[in-house]
C-alpha cells in the first residue's frame, strides 16, 4: 500500500487555521514568511479581523499556504508521500508536494489565480451547490433545462451520489428546483464564485498569460489529476493545463478510483 497525500479544496478554510502550527514549527513559518502576496497572509489566515477569508482572492493563497506548511512539517518528520492528489484548488498543494513548484511559487500562483477568478464574475451573481442523491445523467439534464435561465454546469463529480453545480444564480436556482423534483437535494457551498465552469473562461485566459513563461518542474512522485480523472503523465504544457483546470469539471470520483487501483488507500 502506498502513502498518498490528498489535499482539500476551497470551502474548508476557517479563520485561525494554522496559527498554533506557525508558533510551533519553523518549517511551517517559513512558508508564510517567504510568500509575497498583496495582503497580510498571516493576519487573514490566523485572525481574519475583516471577515474576508471566505472571499476567493484570499481563500486560495490562505488554503495553499496552510497545506504547504503542513507538507513541510510532515516532511521534516520523515513523512513523505508516494503519490499526491487534491480536490480542485487542492491540486496546487499536491503539485507542490510532488515538486512541480515550490511553496512560494504555489502561494503566489494561486494568489493571482484567486484574484482573476473573483474579477471574472464580480458583476455576475453566481455560486455553487452540492447536489445529493442524483446521478450524472439526471443532473446533466436538469442543468441543460435550467440553461435557459443562464449558465449552469456540473462542476464536480465528487462521488456517485454527490456532485456539485456552478453557474449564474438564476440558472443555479432553476437547476435546484428541477433536481428537487427528481428527488435530489442542493446545498449551497461556502464559495464566492462559480468554479470549474464556463464563467471562469476570462480568468483562465488571464491566468495563462500570467504563467505561460513560468518554469515548472517534473513531479518526483505520481500526481493524479482532477481534470483527467487519472494519473497525469504529460507535464510539457503546465500553463495550458492549469488554465484548463480552472474552468473544467473536477472528475474527483474517477481520480479516487484510479488512486485506489494504483495501491493508494481508499
Image (cartoon, grey):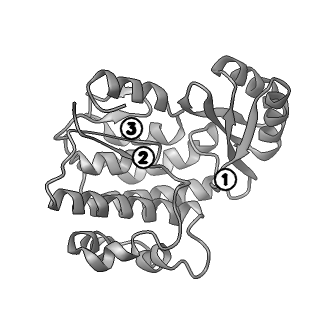
Q: Is residue 218 above or below residue 42?
A: above
Element marked by disc 2: helix
Task: Tell me if label 2 and label 3 are in contact, CB under 8 Å.
Answer: yes
Cα distance, mark 1 to mark 2?
18 Å
Quarter of the figure with residue 177: top right
The disc at residue 229 is none
* Residue 7 point in image, percent of width and height: 39, 48
* Quadrant assignment for the C terminus: top left
Q: Is residue 226 above or below residue 124?
A: above
Label of residue 240 in the image: 3
Q: Earlier in the sequence, mark 1 or mark 3?
A: 1
Residue 121 disc label: 1
Q: How many marks?
A: 3
| N-term mark: 2 or 3 | 2
Q: CA distance from mark 1 to mark 3?
A: 21 Å
Label 1: how many Cα within 10 Å (few below 14, some 14–19, many 20+): many
| Nearer-N-terminus badge (1/2) | 1
Residue topped by disc 2: 208
Residue 121 percent coordinates (x, y): 66, 53
Look at the numbered discs 1 and 2 and tell me whether their residues touch, using CB distance below 8 Å: no
Helix, strand or loop at mark 1: loop
* Marks 1,3: beta carbons within 8 A: no
Residue at the spot 51% in from the left edge and 61% down from the top edge: 13
Amino acid at each position: 500500500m502506498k502513502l498518498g497525500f490528498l489535499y482539500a479544496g476551497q470551502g474548508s478554510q476557517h479563520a485561525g487555521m494554522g496559527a498554533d502550527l506557525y508558533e510551533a514549527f519553523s518549517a511551517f513559518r517559513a512558508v508564510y514568511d517567504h510568500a509575497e502576496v498583496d495582503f497580510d497572509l498571516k493576519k487573514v489566515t490566523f485572525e481574519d479581523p475583516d471577515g474576508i477569508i471566505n472571499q476567493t482572492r484570499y481563500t486560495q493563497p490562505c488554503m495553499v499556504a496552510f497545506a504547504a506548511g503542513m507538507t513541510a512539517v510532515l516532511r521534516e518528520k520523515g513523512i513523505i508521500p508516494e503519490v499526491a492528489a487534491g480536490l480542485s484548488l487542492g491540486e496546487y498543494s499536491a503539485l507542490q508536494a510532488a515538486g512541480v513548484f515550490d511553496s512560494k511559487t504555489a502561494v503566489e500562483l494561486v494568489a493571482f489565480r484567486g484574484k482573476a477568478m473573483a474579477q471574472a464574475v464580480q458583476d455576475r451573481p453566481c455560486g455553487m451547490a452540492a447536489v445529493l442523491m442524483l446521478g450524472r445523467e439526471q443532473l446533466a439534464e436538469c442543468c441543460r433545462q435550467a440553461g435557459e435561465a443562464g449558465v449552469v454546469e456540473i462542476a464536480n463529480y465528487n462521488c456517485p451520489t454527490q456532485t456539485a453545480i456552478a453557474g449564474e444564480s438564476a440558472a443555479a436556482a432553476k437547476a435546484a428546483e428541477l433536481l428537487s423534483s427528481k428527488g435530489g437535494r442542493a446545498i449551497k457551498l461556502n464559495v464566492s464564485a462559480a468554479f470549474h465552469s464556463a464563467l471562469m473562461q476570462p480568468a483562465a485566459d488571464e491566468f495563462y498569460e500570467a504563467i505561460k513563461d513560468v518554469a515548472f518542474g517534473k513531479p518526483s512522485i505520481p500526481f493524479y489529476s482532477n481534470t483527467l480523472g487519472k494519473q497525469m503523465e504529460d507535464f510539457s504544457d503546465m500553463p495550458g493545463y492549469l488554465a484548463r483546470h480552472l474552468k473544467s469539471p473536477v472528475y474527483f470520483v474517477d481520480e479516487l478510483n484510479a488512486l485506489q487501483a494504483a495501491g493508494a488507500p481508499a
